[in-house]
Amino acid sequence: MVDSMVFFKNNPRYIFLLDGLGAILSAVLLAFVLPLFIDFLGMPLETLYTLSILPIVYAIYSLLCYFLNPFQWKFYLRVIASANFLYCLVTMVYLILNLDQTTIFGELYFVLEMLVIVSLATFEMKVSN
């Protein structure tokens, strides 16, 4: 953990790349893969598509930060870390609103996704301090 913290503090643009690629993965899963398993997960199709919007926006933001390599990178990293926390909150709200129809597998997927994203956002906050 300490070694990766040092690496990302010395090479901050790579954490934006990591975040952007992760956001693309989330968007692809939500928009294209999970809809194939709608009966297995129980989450409504509209909800999956709605949840895929934020990762697309986040991917654009993070990849722009990666390519532009801003001088004030700590500020931009705090922005995306906060946005990631917000995405988890939005996901939790949608999960609670659809709890009566989601299956245990759907609940497990979204809880695990939130754990991964909260871990990343927490790491991003630590790197930016």
Image: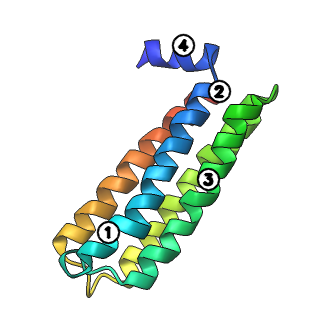
The residue that disc 3 covers is 58
Q: Quadrant of residue 70?
A: top right
Q: Give the CA distance from mark 4 to mark 2.
A: 13 Å
Image depth: mark 4 or mark 1 in front? 1
Q: Sequence order check: which comes first, mark 4 or mark 2?
A: 4
The spot of residue 114 in percent (x, y) is 39, 55
Q: Sequence order check: which comes first, mark 3 or mark 1?
A: 1
Q: Residue at x 54, y 53 (%)?
A: 85
The residue that disc 1 covers is 34
| Category of crowding for the residue at label 4, using alpha-carbon neighbours closer than 10 angstroms: few (below 14), some (14–19), many (at least 20) | few
Q: Give the CA distance from mark 4 to mark 3.
A: 24 Å
Q: Give the CA distance from mark 4 to mark 1.
A: 36 Å
Task: Work out which quarter of the rendered image holds the N terminus and state it.
Answer: top left
Query: Is residue 60 placed above or below 120 in the rendered structure?
Result: below
The residue that disc 4 covers is 6
Q: Sequence order check: which comes first, mark 1 or mark 2?
A: 2
Task: Work out which quarter of the rendered image holds the C terminus and state it.
Answer: top right
Q: Sequence order check: which comes first, mark 4 or mark 1?
A: 4
Amino acid type, mark 4: Val
